[in-house]
Image (cartoon, rainbow, N blue to C red):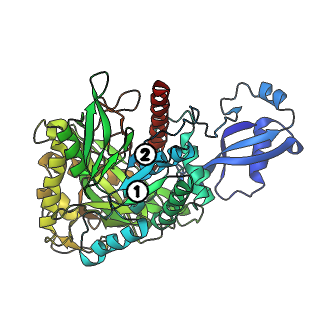
Amino acid sequence: MLRISEIKLPLDHAPADLPAAIASRLGVASDDLLSWTVWKRAHDARRKSAILTVYIVDADVRGEAEVRKRVAGDAHVRPTPDTSYKPPVPKPRPGRLRPVVIGAGPCGLFAGLILAEMGLRPILLDRGKVVRERTKDTWGLWRRSELNPESNVQFGEGGAGTFSDGKLYSQIKDPRYLSRKVLNEFVEAGAPPEILTDAHPHIGTFRLVTMVESLRAKIEALGGEYRFRHRVTDLELDRGPEGGQRIRGVHLHTGEFLEADHVVLAVGHSSRDTFQALYDRGVYIEAKPFSVGFRIEHPQSWIDMAMFGPCAGNPDLGAAAYSLSHHCSNGRTVYSFCMCPGGTVVAAASEPGRLVTNGMSQYSRNERNANAGFVVGISQADFPSDHPLAGIELQRDLEARAFAAGGRDYFAPGQRVGDFLSDRPSSTLGPVVPSYRPGVRPTDLAPLMPDYVIAAMREALPVFGRKIPRYDDPDALLTGVETRTSSPIRITRGTDYQSLNVRGLFPAGEGAGYAGGILSAAVDGIKIAEAVARAHAAASALKA
């Protein structure tokens, strides 16, 4: 088959126009186009008066060899690659000890799935609850200001991505098409098949819940085991034959010890007590940059009109998204993060006395407002010390400030953009109704962030307003604070995916600093599982 890219048709094209365009591109008669399927579908909205639908398709044509010769100079026509998943190592024989996966977010989920498919019967540990019980606890914070530190937006089955827009695209390099394995598994688990063809697929929270449950059932059917409400408090290490440290198991908050010589560390970016335990045990950790800021909300209709012009409201386009970035005069970069069309700002705290925001959308993306992180990049030089966990200290300080500014009951501090730009507190909110629950209290957000962050934001807002009309509208709403953009640490690993100084420990996903989002975390989980299988096979060979 042939893969043809950059096939552009008008937004309102007829169904028959696509096969006609494929035949025309290949220079064949319509009867010679035997079959075709859409690989990816996107929109080009650079000309708002003439928005285009852009396709990548796979086509089976009569006389393919001759066609390939004829189009050899067309960079947009090439053989269709094999995107099926093929494990790079044979299935190893199960050993006495089962591999342990800590964390049941996207990374841990796919690490567990691949290990289960290889017959290694993994044990998945998660400090939180099953996803439906976790959802009830999360609503407890949103509706009643009641935080459960072990079951919330950050902790529990499905990970932080469960309460998000459910974006399933990434900029990672993926020569093996591992992301396709992830998407195929999601569709099998109940995701809409459109995620296989949309250029920017998303699922939304409610669908993610049922998918996570389905994937759990598959892992269990393959011999895997889940243990919820099992928080890892420490590692058991000893000296290996080469003199270095190696994993021997994990200690749980219940007092139980679980013996293991292959442990996947997929704890997510908010397991601060776990990071401290790893540091105390001597696992190599280094600080890494992340970003901090606020959430910004606009009516979705404003964004639709700005991005799509007269085509706004077209059901084929859906709710408009955006991506913005500005390099400021003080050297800082301000950018939009985790943009949620037609979504809500959500309470995402995981520690008492601290307040964090995030964004979430359902699959329909039909809520009143659009929201996005409005954040500024910071580096280790901005941290309060050179300690590897200093970024966590900074996060906690900012989150404590936000908790106090909101009234110490998980209401969030908010400010109108006009007041923020004029350096005056907001006493009331305007027509942009905040979506954050339990609620928003107007105040001054400037004291919640370092001065260099506030200065960069005030410079960037008018710039963004020139790119997207009304972005800096005085009635747009800022809500604080956004601090969990990525992990503040990296649990550094080698080319074999194992910790630099603890054999058998496999740092993975967002928490270890190696992913950013559902898809990249899931792909990292696959790679980690393959690395565990290699290590498991090598260990078995030595014992044989």
> Farthest residue toward the top?
242
Disc 1 + disc 2, Cβ < 8 Å: yes
Q: Is residue 118 above or below residue 440?
A: above
Is 502 above or below relative to 418?
Answer: above
**10 Å crowding of disc 2: few (<14), some (14-19), many (20+):** many
Mark 1 crowd level (few <14, some 14–19, many ≥20, 10 Å Cα): many
Mark 1 / mark 2, whichever is N-terminal:
1
Across the whole image, how many numbered discs are drawn on residues? 2
Please name the residue shown 24% across and 74% down the image: 146
- Quadrant of the image for the N terminus? top right
Q: Secondary structure at mark 2?
A: helix
| Residue 43 visible in rendering | no
Above or below 396: residue 537: above
- The amino acid type, in three-letter code, at marker 1 is Gly
Q: Quadrant of residue 470?
A: bottom left
Image point (79%, 24%), residue name:
69
The spot of residue 339 in percent (x, y) is: 39, 56
Q: Secondary structure at mark 1?
A: helix
User: Most extreme residue toward the right, as rendered?
Assistant: 31
506 relative to 208 in the view: left or right: left
Q: Which numbered disc covers residue 521?
A: 2
Label 1 belongs to which residue?
161
Q: Provide residue 116's location: percent of width, then percent of height.
A: 53, 47
Looking at the rendered structure, the kind of residue marked 2 is: Ala
**Residue situated in front as seen by the camera: 385 or 419:** 385
Residue 105 position, x and y percent, is: 41, 53
